[in-house]
Amino acid sequence: MVFKTSQHHPSQNSTQVAEDRSTVFTLSAILISFTLIAVSACSKKDDAANAGANMPAPVVTVVSVQTESVPTVNELPGRTAPYLISEVRPQVSGIVQKRAFNEGSEVKAGQLLYQIDPAVYQAAYDSAKANLARASASVGSEKLKAQRYAELVKIEAVSKQANDEADASLKQAEAEVASARAALDRARIDLAYTRVVSPISGRIGRSTVTPGALVTANQAAALATVQQLNPIYVDVTQSSAELMAMRRDLEQGKLKSAGDNSVSVQLVLEDGSIFEKEGKLAFSEVTVDQGTGSVTLRAVFPNAKGQLLPGMYVRARMTQGVNSDAIMVPHAAVGRDPRGNATVMVVNAENKVELRVVKTAQSINDKWVVTEGLTAGERVIVEGLQKARPDAVVDPQEAKSAVAQENAATAVAK
Protein backbone atom coordinates (compact mmCIF):
# COMPACT_ATOMS: atom_id res chain seq x y z
CA MET A 1 0.00 0.00 0.00
CA VAL A 2 1.27 3.32 -0.97
CA PHE A 3 0.47 6.41 1.12
CA LYS A 4 0.38 9.93 -0.47
CA THR A 5 1.13 12.88 1.63
CA SER A 6 -0.63 16.23 0.73
CA GLN A 7 1.67 19.10 0.25
CA HIS A 8 0.84 22.87 0.65
CA HIS A 9 2.54 25.50 -1.32
CA PRO A 10 4.10 28.26 0.80
CA SER A 11 2.73 31.03 -1.49
CA GLN A 12 -0.89 29.92 -0.97
CA ASN A 13 -0.65 30.25 2.83
CA SER A 14 0.72 33.77 2.68
CA THR A 15 -2.03 34.91 0.29
CA GLN A 16 -4.78 33.58 2.55
CA VAL A 17 -3.32 35.31 5.60
CA ALA A 18 -3.13 38.61 3.74
CA GLU A 19 -6.78 38.36 2.71
CA ASP A 20 -7.88 37.63 6.28
CA ARG A 21 -5.98 40.63 7.62
CA SER A 22 -7.50 42.94 4.97
CA THR A 23 -10.99 41.82 5.93
CA VAL A 24 -10.33 42.51 9.61
CA PHE A 25 -8.99 45.96 8.88
CA THR A 26 -12.05 46.83 6.69
CA LEU A 27 -14.51 45.72 9.36
CA SER A 28 -12.61 47.70 11.99
CA ALA A 29 -12.70 50.83 9.84
CA ILE A 30 -16.47 50.53 9.32
CA LEU A 31 -17.11 50.08 13.04
CA ILE A 32 -14.97 53.09 13.85
CA SER A 33 -16.85 55.20 11.27
CA PHE A 34 -20.24 54.26 12.72
CA THR A 35 -18.99 55.03 16.19
CA LEU A 36 -17.74 58.47 15.15
CA ILE A 37 -21.04 59.25 13.39
CA ALA A 38 -23.07 58.26 16.45
CA VAL A 39 -20.88 60.31 18.74
CA SER A 40 -21.14 63.30 16.39
CA ALA A 41 -24.93 63.01 16.23
CA CYS A 42 -25.26 62.88 19.98
CA SER A 43 -22.94 65.84 20.28
CA LYS A 44 -25.02 67.87 17.79
CA LYS A 45 -28.24 66.94 19.61
CA ASP A 46 -26.78 68.06 22.90
CA ASP A 47 -25.54 71.29 21.30
CA ALA A 48 -28.99 71.97 19.84
CA ALA A 49 -30.63 71.29 23.16
CA ASN A 50 -28.19 73.59 24.92
CA ALA A 51 -28.71 76.25 22.25
CA GLY A 52 -32.53 76.00 22.65
CA ALA A 53 -32.22 76.26 26.39
CA ASN A 54 -29.98 79.32 26.10
CA MET A 55 -32.06 81.08 23.33
CA PRO A 56 -33.57 84.36 24.61
CA ALA A 57 -37.36 84.73 24.84
CA PRO A 58 -38.93 86.37 21.74
CA VAL A 59 -39.65 90.07 22.02
CA VAL A 60 -43.29 91.13 21.59
CA THR A 61 -44.95 94.53 21.78
CA VAL A 62 -47.82 94.86 24.24
CA VAL A 63 -50.28 97.50 25.36
CA SER A 64 -51.79 97.69 28.82
CA VAL A 65 -55.54 98.06 28.36
CA GLN A 66 -57.34 100.67 30.43
CA THR A 67 -60.96 101.64 30.86
CA GLU A 68 -62.13 104.62 28.81
CA SER A 69 -65.31 106.61 28.40
CA VAL A 70 -66.59 105.98 24.88
CA PRO A 71 -69.92 106.64 23.20
CA THR A 72 -72.15 103.69 22.39
CA VAL A 73 -72.64 104.06 18.66
CA ASN A 74 -75.17 101.91 16.86
CA GLU A 75 -74.94 101.61 13.07
CA LEU A 76 -78.39 100.86 11.72
CA PRO A 77 -79.58 100.25 8.15
CA GLY A 78 -82.19 102.52 6.63
CA ARG A 79 -83.50 104.37 3.60
CA THR A 80 -84.08 107.98 2.75
CA ALA A 81 -87.62 109.34 2.42
CA PRO A 82 -88.92 112.74 1.26
CA TYR A 83 -89.76 115.32 3.91
CA LEU A 84 -92.99 116.19 2.08
CA ILE A 85 -94.59 114.39 -0.85
CA SER A 86 -97.60 115.40 -2.92
CA GLU A 87 -99.26 113.53 -5.77
CA VAL A 88 -100.79 116.07 -8.15
CA ARG A 89 -104.28 115.10 -9.38
CA PRO A 90 -106.90 117.13 -11.31
CA GLN A 91 -109.99 118.30 -9.40
CA VAL A 92 -112.01 119.03 -12.55
CA SER A 93 -112.41 117.12 -15.79
CA GLY A 94 -111.20 118.40 -19.14
CA ILE A 95 -108.55 118.42 -21.83
CA VAL A 96 -104.98 119.34 -20.84
CA GLN A 97 -103.98 122.37 -22.89
CA LYS A 98 -100.36 122.68 -21.77
CA ARG A 99 -97.73 121.50 -19.34
CA ALA A 100 -95.90 124.39 -17.68
CA PHE A 101 -92.85 122.72 -16.05
CA ASN A 102 -89.72 120.74 -16.89
CA GLU A 103 -89.58 117.23 -15.53
CA GLY A 104 -87.08 116.87 -12.69
CA SER A 105 -86.94 120.61 -11.98
CA GLU A 106 -87.56 122.53 -8.78
CA VAL A 107 -91.04 124.03 -8.46
CA LYS A 108 -92.54 126.46 -5.97
CA ALA A 109 -95.80 126.14 -4.08
CA GLY A 110 -98.58 127.69 -6.20
CA GLN A 111 -96.61 127.42 -9.45
CA LEU A 112 -98.68 126.46 -12.51
CA LEU A 113 -98.10 122.87 -13.61
CA TYR A 114 -100.98 122.10 -16.04
CA GLN A 115 -103.66 124.15 -17.72
CA ILE A 116 -107.00 122.40 -18.35
CA ASP A 117 -109.35 123.84 -20.98
CA PRO A 118 -111.38 126.42 -18.99
CA ALA A 119 -114.09 127.22 -21.60
CA VAL A 120 -116.88 125.14 -20.03
CA TYR A 121 -116.07 126.35 -16.54
CA GLN A 122 -115.85 129.98 -17.67
CA ALA A 123 -119.36 129.68 -19.15
CA ALA A 124 -120.68 128.15 -15.93
CA TYR A 125 -119.12 130.97 -13.96
CA ASP A 126 -120.71 133.62 -16.19
CA SER A 127 -124.11 131.91 -15.88
CA ALA A 128 -123.85 131.78 -12.09
CA LYS A 129 -122.87 135.41 -12.01
CA ALA A 130 -125.97 136.35 -14.06
CA ASN A 131 -128.22 134.30 -11.80
CA LEU A 132 -126.85 136.13 -8.81
CA ALA A 133 -127.55 139.47 -10.43
CA ARG A 134 -131.15 138.44 -11.21
CA ALA A 135 -131.71 137.21 -7.68
CA SER A 136 -130.27 140.40 -6.25
CA ALA A 137 -132.64 142.49 -8.37
CA SER A 138 -135.61 140.45 -7.19
CA VAL A 139 -134.61 141.05 -3.60
CA GLY A 140 -134.79 144.82 -4.12
CA SER A 141 -138.35 144.66 -5.43
CA GLU A 142 -139.53 142.32 -2.69
CA LYS A 143 -137.89 144.46 -0.04
CA LEU A 144 -139.74 147.62 -1.15
CA LYS A 145 -143.02 145.72 -1.27
CA ALA A 146 -142.52 144.36 2.22
CA GLN A 147 -141.78 147.86 3.55
CA ARG A 148 -144.98 149.31 2.02
CA TYR A 149 -147.13 146.50 3.37
CA ALA A 150 -145.65 147.01 6.80
CA GLU A 151 -146.85 150.62 6.82
CA LEU A 152 -150.27 149.86 5.31
CA VAL A 153 -151.06 147.05 7.73
CA LYS A 154 -150.79 149.53 10.59
CA ILE A 155 -153.79 151.50 9.22
CA GLU A 156 -155.44 148.27 8.11
CA ALA A 157 -155.16 149.27 4.46
CA VAL A 158 -153.99 145.72 3.67
CA SER A 159 -154.70 142.49 5.40
CA LYS A 160 -152.24 140.87 7.75
CA GLN A 161 -152.11 137.87 5.40
CA ALA A 162 -150.93 140.09 2.54
CA ASN A 163 -148.29 141.59 4.81
CA ASP A 164 -147.11 138.11 5.84
CA GLU A 165 -146.91 137.00 2.23
CA ALA A 166 -144.81 140.07 1.39
CA ASP A 167 -142.38 139.23 4.22
CA ALA A 168 -142.17 135.61 3.02
CA SER A 169 -141.49 136.70 -0.56
CA LEU A 170 -138.65 138.94 0.68
CA LYS A 171 -137.06 136.10 2.64
CA GLN A 172 -137.40 133.77 -0.33
CA ALA A 173 -135.71 136.30 -2.59
CA GLU A 174 -132.87 136.70 -0.08
CA ALA A 175 -132.46 132.90 0.02
CA GLU A 176 -132.27 132.79 -3.75
CA VAL A 177 -129.53 135.43 -3.62
CA ALA A 178 -127.57 133.31 -1.15
CA SER A 179 -128.02 130.24 -3.33
CA ALA A 180 -126.93 132.15 -6.45
CA ARG A 181 -123.90 133.48 -4.59
CA ALA A 182 -122.92 129.94 -3.53
CA ALA A 183 -123.31 128.73 -7.10
CA LEU A 184 -121.10 131.56 -8.26
CA ASP A 185 -118.46 130.62 -5.69
CA ARG A 186 -118.57 127.01 -6.83
CA ALA A 187 -118.24 128.07 -10.47
CA ARG A 188 -115.30 130.31 -9.54
CA ILE A 189 -113.58 127.43 -7.71
CA ASP A 190 -114.08 125.05 -10.62
CA LEU A 191 -112.70 127.66 -12.99
CA ALA A 192 -109.67 128.12 -10.73
CA TYR A 193 -109.13 124.34 -10.65
CA THR A 194 -108.50 124.38 -14.39
CA ARG A 195 -105.10 125.76 -13.36
CA VAL A 196 -103.38 122.78 -11.73
CA VAL A 197 -100.74 124.25 -9.41
CA SER A 198 -98.07 122.72 -7.17
CA PRO A 199 -99.30 122.30 -3.59
CA ILE A 200 -95.76 122.33 -2.12
CA SER A 201 -92.27 123.44 -3.04
CA GLY A 202 -89.88 120.72 -4.11
CA ARG A 203 -88.61 118.64 -7.00
CA ILE A 204 -91.17 117.38 -9.49
CA GLY A 205 -90.86 114.03 -11.22
CA ARG A 206 -91.96 112.84 -14.62
CA SER A 207 -95.34 113.76 -16.07
CA THR A 208 -97.82 110.97 -16.78
CA VAL A 209 -99.86 113.05 -19.27
CA THR A 210 -99.13 115.27 -22.23
CA PRO A 211 -101.08 118.19 -23.73
CA GLY A 212 -104.25 116.91 -25.38
CA ALA A 213 -104.89 114.19 -22.80
CA LEU A 214 -108.28 113.92 -21.13
CA VAL A 215 -108.17 114.00 -17.34
CA THR A 216 -111.02 113.49 -14.89
CA ALA A 217 -111.69 114.88 -11.44
CA ASN A 218 -110.09 112.88 -8.60
CA GLN A 219 -108.70 110.21 -10.94
CA ALA A 220 -106.58 107.42 -9.47
CA ALA A 221 -103.45 108.14 -11.53
CA ALA A 222 -101.42 111.16 -10.48
CA LEU A 223 -100.38 113.67 -13.12
CA ALA A 224 -97.00 114.14 -11.41
CA THR A 225 -95.38 113.88 -7.97
CA VAL A 226 -93.67 116.71 -6.11
CA GLN A 227 -91.23 115.86 -3.29
CA GLN A 228 -89.55 118.18 -0.83
CA LEU A 229 -86.00 116.91 -0.33
CA ASN A 230 -84.51 119.64 1.85
CA PRO A 231 -84.56 118.61 4.62
CA ILE A 232 -84.95 114.87 4.07
CA TYR A 233 -85.95 111.98 6.31
CA VAL A 234 -83.88 108.87 6.99
CA ASP A 235 -85.91 105.94 8.35
CA VAL A 236 -83.81 103.28 10.11
CA THR A 237 -84.80 100.14 11.99
CA GLN A 238 -83.46 98.77 15.24
CA SER A 239 -84.41 95.44 16.78
CA SER A 240 -86.57 95.65 19.86
CA ALA A 241 -84.11 93.35 21.69
CA GLU A 242 -81.24 95.82 21.16
CA LEU A 243 -83.44 98.72 22.23
CA MET A 244 -84.49 96.92 25.42
CA ALA A 245 -80.87 95.96 26.22
CA MET A 246 -79.75 99.57 25.81
CA ARG A 247 -82.54 100.86 28.06
CA ARG A 248 -81.68 98.21 30.66
CA ASP A 249 -78.01 99.25 30.63
CA LEU A 250 -79.06 102.88 31.08
CA GLU A 251 -81.23 101.98 34.05
CA GLN A 252 -78.46 99.89 35.64
CA GLY A 253 -75.87 102.61 35.17
CA LYS A 254 -73.73 100.67 32.70
CA LEU A 255 -74.47 103.38 30.16
CA LYS A 256 -74.93 107.08 30.62
CA SER A 257 -77.29 109.16 28.55
CA ALA A 258 -75.63 110.91 25.62
CA GLY A 259 -77.54 114.12 26.37
CA ASP A 260 -81.02 115.44 25.73
CA ASN A 261 -83.56 113.95 23.37
CA SER A 262 -81.84 115.57 20.40
CA VAL A 263 -79.53 112.70 19.38
CA SER A 264 -77.07 113.49 16.60
CA VAL A 265 -76.91 111.06 13.68
CA GLN A 266 -74.08 110.48 11.19
CA LEU A 267 -74.88 109.07 7.78
CA VAL A 268 -72.81 106.50 5.85
CA LEU A 269 -73.68 106.43 2.14
CA GLU A 270 -73.83 103.42 -0.18
CA ASP A 271 -70.23 103.88 -1.35
CA GLY A 272 -68.93 103.99 2.24
CA SER A 273 -68.37 107.75 2.33
CA ILE A 274 -69.63 109.90 5.20
CA PHE A 275 -72.34 112.47 4.45
CA GLU A 276 -71.01 115.96 5.13
CA LYS A 277 -73.90 117.08 7.37
CA GLU A 278 -75.10 115.58 10.64
CA GLY A 279 -78.77 114.98 11.31
CA LYS A 280 -80.99 114.79 14.38
CA LEU A 281 -83.19 111.99 15.63
CA ALA A 282 -86.74 113.31 15.26
CA PHE A 283 -89.04 110.35 15.90
CA SER A 284 -89.10 106.90 17.45
CA GLU A 285 -91.90 104.48 16.69
CA VAL A 286 -93.91 103.33 19.70
CA THR A 287 -95.00 100.03 18.14
CA VAL A 288 -92.87 96.99 17.34
CA ASP A 289 -93.35 95.60 13.85
CA GLN A 290 -94.86 92.13 14.29
CA GLY A 291 -93.25 90.81 11.13
CA THR A 292 -89.66 91.92 11.76
CA GLY A 293 -89.56 92.56 15.52
CA SER A 294 -87.99 95.96 14.94
CA VAL A 295 -88.72 99.59 15.79
CA THR A 296 -88.52 102.42 13.24
CA LEU A 297 -86.41 105.47 14.06
CA ARG A 298 -86.62 108.62 11.92
CA ALA A 299 -83.84 111.21 11.57
CA VAL A 300 -83.86 114.54 9.72
CA PHE A 301 -80.89 115.65 7.60
CA PRO A 302 -80.22 118.92 5.75
CA ASN A 303 -79.98 118.32 2.02
CA ALA A 304 -79.38 121.72 0.43
CA LYS A 305 -77.24 120.28 -2.39
CA GLY A 306 -79.71 117.52 -3.18
CA GLN A 307 -77.15 114.72 -2.71
CA LEU A 308 -79.63 112.50 -0.91
CA LEU A 309 -82.42 111.13 -3.08
CA PRO A 310 -85.53 109.27 -1.89
CA GLY A 311 -85.09 105.52 -1.62
CA MET A 312 -81.30 105.47 -1.16
CA TYR A 313 -79.88 102.74 1.10
CA VAL A 314 -77.82 104.25 3.90
CA ARG A 315 -76.47 103.38 7.35
CA ALA A 316 -77.05 105.72 10.26
CA ARG A 317 -74.64 105.95 13.18
CA MET A 318 -76.35 107.10 16.36
CA THR A 319 -74.86 107.74 19.78
CA GLN A 320 -77.39 106.18 22.13
CA GLY A 321 -75.36 106.27 25.34
CA VAL A 322 -71.90 106.57 26.89
CA ASN A 323 -69.98 103.60 28.33
CA SER A 324 -67.74 105.04 31.03
CA ASP A 325 -65.87 101.73 31.70
CA ALA A 326 -65.17 100.54 28.18
CA ILE A 327 -61.99 98.61 27.36
CA MET A 328 -60.42 99.51 24.02
CA VAL A 329 -58.13 97.10 22.14
CA PRO A 330 -56.29 97.91 18.87
CA HIS A 331 -57.49 96.10 15.76
CA ALA A 332 -54.04 94.55 15.31
CA ALA A 333 -54.40 92.65 18.58
CA VAL A 334 -57.68 90.93 17.75
CA GLY A 335 -57.79 87.70 15.76
CA ARG A 336 -60.34 84.98 15.08
CA ASP A 337 -60.39 81.31 16.02
CA PRO A 338 -61.77 78.57 13.72
CA ARG A 339 -65.23 79.14 15.22
CA GLY A 340 -65.14 82.82 14.41
CA ASN A 341 -64.75 84.00 18.01
CA ALA A 342 -62.64 87.07 18.65
CA THR A 343 -59.36 86.27 20.44
CA VAL A 344 -56.37 88.15 21.86
CA MET A 345 -52.95 87.09 23.16
CA VAL A 346 -52.45 88.20 26.77
CA VAL A 347 -49.10 88.22 28.62
CA ASN A 348 -49.63 87.28 32.26
CA ALA A 349 -47.54 88.20 35.31
CA GLU A 350 -45.07 85.36 34.56
CA ASN A 351 -44.56 86.67 31.01
CA LYS A 352 -46.35 83.64 29.63
CA VAL A 353 -48.75 83.94 26.72
CA GLU A 354 -52.45 83.18 27.21
CA LEU A 355 -54.99 82.81 24.42
CA ARG A 356 -58.11 84.70 25.54
CA VAL A 357 -61.55 84.63 23.89
CA VAL A 358 -63.18 88.08 24.07
CA LYS A 359 -66.44 89.69 23.01
CA THR A 360 -66.36 92.84 20.90
CA ALA A 361 -69.26 95.29 20.74
CA GLN A 362 -68.27 97.91 18.17
CA SER A 363 -65.34 99.44 16.33
CA ILE A 364 -64.29 103.04 16.99
CA ASN A 365 -61.55 104.36 14.71
CA ASP A 366 -58.72 101.79 14.95
CA LYS A 367 -59.88 100.02 18.14
CA TRP A 368 -62.43 97.46 19.21
CA VAL A 369 -64.62 97.98 22.26
CA VAL A 370 -64.26 94.77 24.32
CA THR A 371 -67.15 93.98 26.67
CA GLU A 372 -66.06 90.56 27.95
CA GLY A 373 -62.79 88.65 28.41
CA LEU A 374 -60.41 91.42 29.53
CA THR A 375 -59.89 93.51 32.62
CA ALA A 376 -58.11 96.81 33.08
CA GLY A 377 -54.31 96.52 33.39
CA GLU A 378 -53.86 93.33 31.40
CA ARG A 379 -51.17 93.34 28.70
CA VAL A 380 -52.27 92.48 25.17
CA ILE A 381 -49.85 91.63 22.36
CA VAL A 382 -50.15 93.97 19.36
CA GLU A 383 -46.90 93.15 17.51
CA GLY A 384 -44.97 89.88 17.25
CA LEU A 385 -48.02 87.63 17.32
CA GLN A 386 -46.27 85.20 14.96
CA LYS A 387 -43.64 84.62 17.65
CA ALA A 388 -46.15 84.11 20.47
CA ARG A 389 -47.60 80.72 21.30
CA PRO A 390 -49.88 79.83 24.21
CA ASP A 391 -47.87 79.01 27.38
CA ALA A 392 -44.65 80.28 25.76
CA VAL A 393 -42.44 82.74 27.65
CA VAL A 394 -41.93 86.08 25.87
CA ASP A 395 -40.14 89.34 26.49
CA PRO A 396 -42.93 91.98 26.54
CA GLN A 397 -42.08 95.53 25.52
CA GLU A 398 -44.63 98.26 26.13
CA ALA A 399 -45.74 100.02 22.94
CA LYS A 400 -44.98 103.71 22.63
CA SER A 401 -47.90 106.07 22.65
CA ALA A 402 -48.83 107.87 19.45
CA VAL A 403 -47.68 111.18 20.92
CA ALA A 404 -44.28 109.75 21.88
CA GLN A 405 -43.83 108.23 18.43
CA GLU A 406 -44.68 111.53 16.79
CA ASN A 407 -42.23 113.41 19.00
CA ALA A 408 -39.52 110.85 18.26
CA ALA A 409 -40.12 111.13 14.53
CA THR A 410 -39.94 114.93 14.75
CA ALA A 411 -36.66 114.74 16.65
CA VAL A 412 -35.14 112.40 14.04
CA ALA A 413 -36.28 114.68 11.23
CA LYS A 414 -34.54 117.63 12.88
Image (spheres, helix red, strand yellow):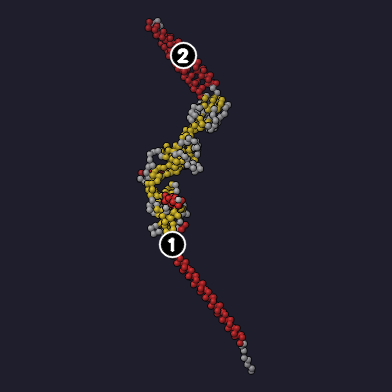
Q: Is residue 229 visible?
A: yes
Which residue in the rendered view is the most extreme toward the front? 414
- Helix, strand or loop at label 2? It is helix
Residue at image position (47%, 42%) is 274
User: Dot 1 lies on which element?
Assistant: loop
Residue 404's mark?
Answer: none
Return the x and y of residue 172 as percentages of the image width and height: 44, 14
Q: On the rendered image, what quadrant is the N terminus found in? A: bottom right
The residue furthest bottom is 1
Q: Which residue corresponds to the image point at 48% horizontal and 28% vertical from the top-left?
A: 109
Q: Which residue is mark 2?
A: 136
Q: Nearer the viewer, residue 409 or 95?
A: 409
Tag count in the figure?
Answer: 2
Q: Is residue 96 above or below residue 281?
A: above
Label 1, on which residue? 56
Q: Position of residue 185 (x, y in %)?
A: 47, 20
Q: Quadrant of residue 98?
A: top right
The answer to whether residue 241 shows anywhere in this view is: no
Placement of 4 over or under 271, stated as above or below: below
Residue drawn at x 48%, y 38% as measured from the top left: 80
